[in-house]
Amino acid sequence: MKTQVKLFILIPIILISCNSGTPLRQKSPEEIRQELKIKEQTSFLNYLTVEYNLDKTFWTSEDVIKGFVANSASIARFKDVVLTVTFLTATDTELGSKDYVVYKFFEPNSRTDFEIKTKSPAATKKIGVKVKTVVPVD
């Protein structure tokens, strides 16, 4: 019984003392920035939001979507954001969707304006706009 108790106490002590001997190194500020940049770039949907308005024109066949993309990332820069525009009826029935590329840079903690000219399906009463993809900038 005493042998079992001694083993029970000694095994954790031996395991703890078998540490590799190298202390844990703190990450440099540049390493921390790089990790944050990678996180922001890979989860861009958490950082890019879209606000917009649809202006229907009666004298031409084109409608104009004006708005901005806000980038709340603290480090990550993006370019060439692909926006998916979904055309909806008054009852929220989807009539179709189309992708548009906004060829601009999207800086950290900033808003970037955009304007899209499109031909909406005849029964379109409202639209939805969301970010589909982006190109990260190093």
Image (spheres, helix red, strand yellow):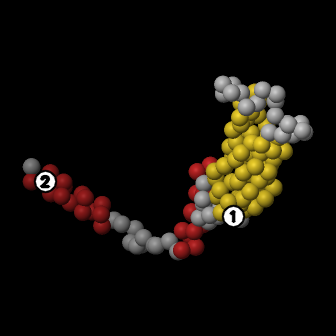
Residue pictured at 13% horizontal, 53% vertical:
5
According to the picture, the residue beneath numbered tag 2 turns out to be: 5
Q: Nearer the viewer, residue 66 or 30?
A: 66
Residues under numbered marks 1 and 2 in contact, where contact means CB atoms less than 8 Å apart: no
Residue farthest toward the front in the current orientation of the protein: 59
Label at residue 135: none
Q: In the rendering, at what x and y percent does residue 70 appear?
A: 65, 56
Identify which amino acid the numbered label 2 is placed on.
Val
Of callouts 1 and 2, the N-terminal one: 2
Image side of residue 100 versus residue 9, left or right: right
Residue pictured at 76% horizontal, 30% vertical:
124
According to the picture, the residue beneath numbered tag 1 turns out to be: 107
Q: Nearer the viewer, residue 84 or 120?
A: 120
Nearer the camera: disc 1 or disc 2: 1
Identify which amino acid the numbered label 1 is placed on.
Glu
Q: In the rendering, at what x and y percent does residue 137 appear?
A: 72, 62
Say above or below: 111 vs 123: below
Q: Can you see residue 137?
A: yes
Q: State the image quarter where residue 109 is shown.
A: bottom right
Assign a secondary structure to mark 2. helix
Q: In the rendering, at what x and y percent does residue 34 appear?
A: 60, 66
Q: State the image quarter where residue 95 is shown.
A: top right
Pointer 2 local density, CA inside 10 Å: few below 14, some 14–19, many at least 20: few
Q: State the image quarter where residue 74 is shown.
A: bottom right
Q: Nearer the viewer, residue 118 or 100?
A: 118
Q: In the rendering, at what x and y percent does residue 66 appear?
A: 76, 49
Residue pictured at 81% horizontal, 55% vertical:
103
Residue pictured at 24% horizontal, 63% vertical:
13
